Amino acid sequence: MKKLLLPLALAAALASPGLASADEAAAKSNGCLKCHATDKKKDGPAFKEVAKKYKGKADAEAKLTAFLSKGGKIKVDGVEEDHKTVKGGDAAVAGKITKWILAM
């Protein structure tokens, strides 16, 4: 049993960077990184700050996925605007991006 666990753990560790890259690519292709960065504020908050805000909240993933797929209101320079959604409102893509953000 121990002989099986080590290869599985190594495979999972090696696969994780690839998954993170794919999810970051989804964020880029949906325009998220125009207004957000992972570690610093741009027009929108840093994704690490978003993750920190939602840490430990049971509904975080569902709430952020819905926001990214359906949109919502945000304030930019004190003016309320509609937040853009992922292309086509694709909930699966929104979920991938949400998981990437919350993992930070």
Image: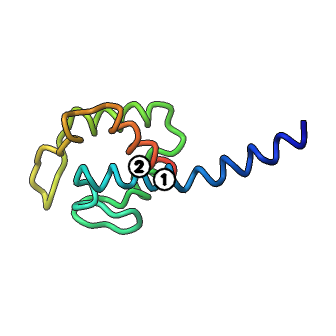
Residue 56 lies, in percent from the top left, at 54, 41
Quadrant of the rendered structure where residue 8 is? top right
**According to the image, what is the colour scheme of the structure?**
rainbow
Callout 2: few (<14), some (14-19), or many (20+) C-alpha neighbours within 10 Å?
many
Q: Residue at x 26, y 34 (%)?
A: 69
Q: Residue at x 45, y 51 (%)?
A: 51
Q: Residue at x 26, y 59 (%)?
A: 44
Q: Is residue 14 left or right of residue 35?
A: right
Tag 2 and tag 1, C-beta contact below 8 Å? yes
Going by the numbered disc 2, the residue's amino acid type is Asp
Residue 12 lies, in percent from the top left, at 66, 47
Q: Residue furthest right?
A: 2
Q: Residue at x 49, y 37 (%)?
A: 57
Residue 80 lies, in percent from the top left, at 11, 48
The answer for how far apart the CA atoms under marks 2 and 1 are is 5 Å
Number of marks in picture = 2
Disc 1 designates what residue?
A: 20
Closest to the observer, 39 or 18: 18
Q: Is residue 54 left or right of residue 17?
A: left
Callout 1: few (<14), some (14-19), or many (20+) C-alpha neighbours within 10 Å?
some
Residue 87: numbered disc = none
> Secondary structure under badge 1?
helix
> Secondary structure under badge 2?
helix
Going by the numbered disc 1, the residue's amino acid type is Ala
Q: Is residue 93 left or right of residue 4?
A: left
Q: In the rendered view of the protein, which quadrant contains the N terminus?
A: top right
Disc 2 designates what residue?
A: 23
